[in-house]
Image (cartoon, rainbow, N blue to C red):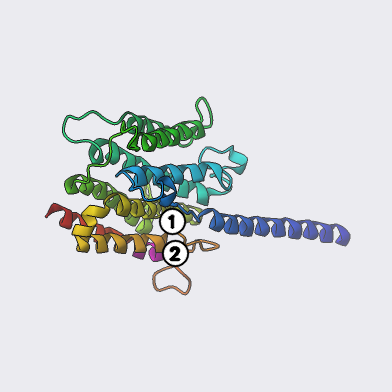
Amino acid sequence: MALLRRLLLSRSGIIALLWLASIVGLHYGQKRHNELHVDLGETAEVGETLVPGTALATTVATLIDHELQHGFGWRPNDFFLWGPRLWADNNANRQLGILQTVRETIRVMKDHLTKISSDEFDANLQEADTMFRNDAERLWMPSAESRYRKGVEHLHEYVRGLQPQLAISKPINQRHMELMRLFQAWTDLLGAAHANLYRREINETRIRPWETDDLFYRAQGFAHAMAHCLKAIEHDYAPALDERPILADLIAEVRQSLDAAAPLKPLVVIDDRPAGLFANHRRNLDSYITEARQKMYSIREELEK
């Protein structure tokens, strides 16, 4: 009997060690996956100026392609035994935040940044927008991955069409009033993130410990995608920003706040009381989210002048 008990304890110990090792492995794997470098200089020949729209479209394509091709790939639609509802829900929720930001960014780019009044939509942006609207949790017929790859291909075609020798894509018009619509969309997303980071209940039920990190990583996905898109905006709107230094400074400050939020990766997301002994990671992340959101309001005020 004692031998059997020791054997069971030994097996339990092995299982516990394997479980802990899997958590640590996922943690460090996610930290590496979260690192993304977008070299916008690679999209232009030496001495060539990027046509407005090149930087933003390239950045969005890189964001989605990175989530599809690196790490464990697209997680929200994975088979349940290793999917987001059982394992790796952190990356799945982060990807959903990235996707939601991409959807809003491409929508505004299609409807406003490259279009004035009754102009036609850019065909490739319209197709990319449609592809990214597909269900993120759809496993097949068609799979989410196949639709998002198509969206990435259309963005690459859009960038190719901006080249001077073709000039068949619609460049960003660089109008301040149209850019304001993008910041309106982003502040709405950050407002939703702020509310979730302070939320205590979902559908009148108190948030359970394993749901806390879902809200954390969804908000972080917003920050990650917006930080990279802001770098693209600094490229695509460079002449206009040179004329409005205060606007350029505000955009740089927002990007810095989001850059600080995007890589935060605690081993376990803790949701202690604000005055408690342990960390409250949702509140910590929200400090960066709120700072970025408030400065986006200032950007919108500047763009209205």
- Say if residue 206 shows up in the picture: no
Up-down relation of residue 89 to residue 165 (above or below): below
Give the total of numbered labels.
2
Distance Cα–Cα, label 1 vs label 2: 8 Å
Q: Which residue in the protein does label 2 denote?
A: 281
Regarding residue 46, the answer to whether it shows in the image is yes
Q: Which amino acid does label 2 sit on?
A: His
Say whether residue 283 is magenta.
yes
Q: Does the magenta stretch include residue 197?
A: no
How far across and how far down the image is residue 28, in percent? Answer: 59, 59
The residue depicted at 19 percent of the width and 59 percent of the height is: 244
User: Picture coordinates of residue 146 (x, y %)?
Assistant: 50, 31
* For residue 71, above or below residue 242: above
In this orientation, which residue lies closer to the viewer: 183 or 245? Answer: 245
> Which SS type dominates the magenta stretch?
helix
First along the sequence among labels 1 and 2? 1
**Image quadrant where one finds the N terminus:** bottom right
Question: Mark 1: which amino acid?
Answer: Phe
The secondary structure type at the circle numbered 1 is helix
Q: Tell whether 20 sits left or right of 183.
A: right
| Residue designated by label 1 | 216
Q: Where is residue 251 in the image (x, y as percent from the top left)?
A: 28, 59
Dot 2: element: helix
Rendered location of residue 161, percent (x, y): 35, 33
Q: In which quarter of the image is the C terminus?
A: bottom left
**Mark 1 surroundings: few (<14), some (14-19) or many (≥20) residues within 10 A:** many
